[in-house]
Image (tube, helix red, strand yellow):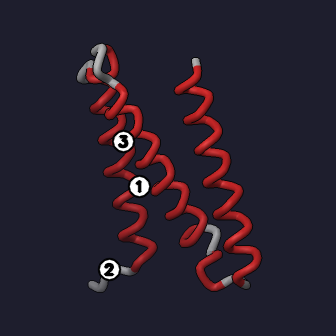
Amino acid sequence: MKLRLIDLVWLLLLAATATTWWLDASGKLDTPAHTPVVWFIFGLAWLKGLGVILEFMELRHAPALWRNALLALFTLMVALILLAWAVA
């Protein structure tokens, strides 16, 4: 049985989701020094979005303009949410 790229991305999405759930359930976000954990979670969220955009929305083979525009908008969205968290 050959593991396809989309299957690998799906497994990585599951692993990233389980990791963020574990970080919350373990109380890592309740400590005063939780900033690196939050940055890590946002990084995982960005990687998960990248996997969904490229593999599940099949933009890996789309014209470069569409792919780059969507990736730029998604990156901007994550950055603005992170900025709002940092300011609050």
Q: Of label 1 and label 2, which has the lower sequence position? A: 2
Side of 64 relative to 33 (left or right): right
State which quarter of the image contains the N terminus. bottom left
Front label number (3 vs 1)? 3
| Circle 3 crowding by C-alpha within 10 Å: few under 14, some 14–19, many from 20 | few
Across and down, in percent, residue 78 comes to 59, 45
Disc 3 marks a residue whose amino acid type is Phe
On the image, which quarter does residue 72 sit in?
A: bottom right
Q: Which residue is mark 2?
A: 3
Q: CA distance from mark 1 to mark 2?
A: 15 Å
Image position of 13 with respect to 84: above or below: below
- Secondary structure beneath dot 3 equals helix
Q: Residue at x 43, y 48 (%)?
A: 43
Q: Which mark is residue 40?
A: 3
Q: Which residue is mark 1?
A: 13
Label 1: which secondary element: helix
Going by the numbered disc 2, the residue's amino acid type is Leu
